[in-house]
């Protein structure tokens, strides 16, 4: 009876553990093809061929192309994520620089266009893009600002919502304008956000 109880208490097997190296190969392949071909032309069989796996292996992990593409972008977002330094301006500049670098690596504006165009027919793509890329980035900006308010480096009435909108939408606005990005674009954008937050701008000292 005790032996039977021990057997019942053992966790059920769910198959072989996933190989992290294989997962990375699939996501790297998806990211490469997303950057090279765009979302619309990215094909699952091409991802499988580049990763050296079968399509069945991919579908064991991802429900479809929207799931895979946004998972690849999520991995890019968290790779090399800047570590907070405690200086708000420095941290916001680092976050904005990483966001711009990632956006330019995979031509994210084209993907946003696809998300908007296909939102009615493929709502899953927009939902996953928001959940895995847009909202986490906004949450990072919001957390950095909230920490600065809590520590007294920003006034209690700082308009966090307006500053997050500014930071999160700045790249798209500049890209759509067709104007080149100046060398100090990240710094100038953050300084504008700092002024919205009531902290002035123009250098680390202004961040408190």
Image: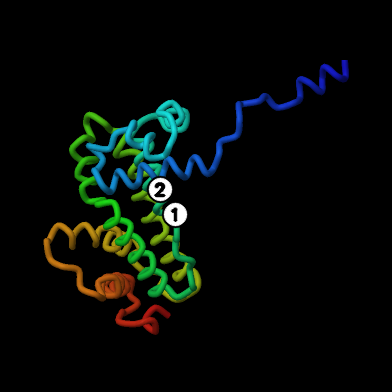
Where is residue 18 shown, x and y percent of the image? 56, 36
On-image quarter of the N terminus: top right
Q: Nearer the viewer, residue 155 or 180?
A: 180
Q: Please state if 61 lies on the left or on the right of 32 as rendered.
A: right
User: What scheme was used to colour the molecule?
Assistant: rainbow
Q: Which residue is mark 2?
A: 74
**Disc number placed over residue 62 in the picture, else none:** none
User: Outermost residue, right direction?
Assistant: 2
Residue shown at 39% from the left, 84% from the top: 205
Q: Which residue is mark 1?
A: 78
Where is residue 88 shown, x and y percent of the image? 42, 73
Secondary structure under tag 2 reads helix
Residue shown at 40% from the left, 52% from the top: 76
Residue shown at 45% from the left, 43% from the top: 25
Above-or-below relation of 126 to 144: above
Where is residue 57 shown, x and y percent of the image? 46, 29
Q: Are dots 2 and 1 in contact, CB under 8 Å?
A: yes
């Amino acid at each position: 009876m005790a032996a039977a109880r021990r057997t019942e208490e053992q966790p059920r097997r769910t198959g072989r553990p996933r190989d992290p190296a294989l997962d990375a190969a699939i996501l790297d392949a998806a990211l490469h093809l997303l950057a090279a071909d765009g979302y619309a032309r990215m094909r699952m069989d091409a991802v499988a061929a580049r990763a050296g796996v079968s399509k069945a292996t991919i579908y064991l992990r991802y429900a479809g192309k929207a799931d895979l593409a946004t998972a690849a972008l999520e991995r890019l977002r968290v790779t090399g994520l800047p570590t907070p330094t405690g200086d708000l301006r420095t941290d916001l500049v680092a976050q904005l620089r990483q966001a711009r670098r990632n956006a330019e690596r995979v031509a994210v504006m084209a993907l946003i266009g696809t998300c908007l165009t296909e939102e009615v027919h493929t709502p899953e793509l927009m939902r996953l893009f928001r959940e895995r890329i847009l909202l986490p980035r906004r949450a990072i900006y919001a957390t950095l600002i909230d920490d600065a308010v809590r520590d007294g480096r920003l006034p209690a009435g700082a308009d966090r919502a307006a500053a997050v909108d500014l930071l999160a939408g700045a790249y798209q606005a500049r890209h759509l304008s067709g104007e080149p990005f100046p060398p100090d674009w990240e710094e100038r954008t953050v300084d504008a956000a700092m002024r919205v937050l009531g902290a002035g701008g123009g250098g680390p000292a202004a961040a408190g």
